[in-house]
Amino acid sequence: MAGAFAAAALAGHGRRVTVLERDTLPAEPAPRRGVPQGRQPHVFLHRGLMAVEELLPGVDADLRAAGGVPLDTGDMAWLGEFGWAPIAPQYGIVSATRPLFEHVVLRHVRALQGVEVRDGTAVTGLERASDGRWVVRVEGDEPLSADLVVDASGRSSRLPVWLERLGLPEAPVSQVNAHVGYATAEVRVARGRTAVPGIAFLQTPARAGGLALPVEGDRWLVTTVGSGVLRPGRDRQAFVDALVGLPDDALADLVADTDLGEVAIHRQTGNLRHHYEQVRDWPDGLLVVGDALCAFNPVYGQGITVAALEALVLRDAGPLLRRDAGLIMRRLAKAVDLPWRIATGEDLRYPAAQGSVPRATAMFSAWTRVLGRLSAHGSVEAQVSIGSVYHLMASPLVLLHPSLVAKALRARLLGYGDPTPRPRILGTDDPPPLALPRLGIQRIPRRKRGRSSETSGTEPESDGKTVIGEFQTGS
């Protein structure tokens, strides 16, 4: 996706843009090897959908026409660390599978003037010619020459090796890995079975989490997620066990007496950031985007959104694209700063995580949890403010609004008040018992659970893309 967005940003103005994709792209929406998390749910944040629509007008409408499900995240049932969030309008998204989203985006990219997408093409090297142009070596084919190269080749980018061969200093690297894993199965849910458009039980350092989202074809993707010993397994019995072990019965009830699809797991979830913006004498005509620049724990749904925002940086760079790549790299680094703080600030709370929490990140995370507690006791303002930052629609400064600070102080002195009640999640108050006879899975005894709002506290991944923008003379 980062490569596709970069191509959209660079297209036009007489430019020729070539996208080199290692995978063979399917003719219809389907998972592919270069996207190991392709069977997992993908949350396209509201700001990300806005950015994609800026780059490729019509993607939103085409997603909906292809069966993507529009929903308001504020209407979902959210169970956070401190209890249920109040139902209140927030930000609209379109829920769809990763293959469908990718298929629609690439269809729009291929239609752009001057853009060529070459799939089944592996890049093997990057060199600098004597005239200053870049030479991209391709397996089994003639090398390509370009004024501008954008590396969008994902977590397994070979750029650090190629830069070393060019005599450039090594870029500092930041890593945070909470050893999070998640497992997803596809189910068919009858219309009217749910009273909410989606369900989310946020994981915490002490417990696993879960998610259920509708996608095209009257299907739902149901997921469990945990860190360390709480990571779910890949077999169906382990998946059902994980659902039963969640702090609420809704997800287990949702899949009761259904045909569970194959369980897909994903554990390549470490946060990895290359600080190329700190490399002195960064070469002009070379830029890095997507996971090749900064890879996030996919659980937080930030990757595609950040890639689209990075593409807007490229679009707005104009003549700087060839004259001051170092400045553009600093702008790209700024675009990933907030999502990086959100993802790593949360991941560093987990016992399995390695690394120390920067003081500013720790304070941001702690204050967000204070607002989460307010939300769990009925504060719509706190919930909407958190959502605005999470969807990258507002600065974290909105979390310091005087009214929120006053509410937090008042709650600290006088108490938080009544908890937000559990919303009605399923369309019936008498859900079927947890039994999956079609799978031969035995009924699992359910422990008694209260409905209180308070609750207690790999191999490298690659999307295989390199984008080469070749500018015509004088453009």
Image (cartoon, helix red, strand yellow):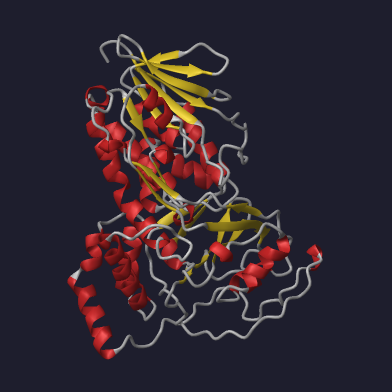
- Please identify the quarter of the rendering in which residue 256 is found: bottom right
Residue 98's spot in the image, x, y percent?
54, 45
Residue 318's spot in the image, x, y percent?
24, 27
* Relative to 394, 97 lies left or right: right
Residue farthest to the bottom? 414
Residue at (53% x, 45% y) in the render? 65
Residue 427's spot in the image, x, y percent?
60, 73
Viewer-side residue, 230 vs 64 = 230
* Relative to 224, 176 lies left or right: left
Residue 52's spot in the image, x, y percent?
39, 41
- Please identify the quarter of the rendering in which residue 223 is found: bottom right
- Please identify the quarter of the rendering in which residue 55 is found: top left
* Relative to 14, 228 lies left or right: right
Q: Is residue 442 above or below residue 48?
A: below
Answer yes or no: is residue 380 visible. no
Answer yes or no: is residue 347 visible. yes
Q: Is residue 394 above or below residue 254?
A: above
Viewer-side residue, 456 vs 189 = 456
**How many discs mark residues in the rendered view?**
0
Residue at (74% x, 68% y) in the render? 257
Viewer-side residue, 265 vs 217 = 265
Q: Quadrant of the C terminus?
A: top left
Residue at (53% x, 41% y) in the render? 460
Q: Is residue 104 above or below residue 269?
A: above
Q: Is residue 102 above or below residue 239?
A: above
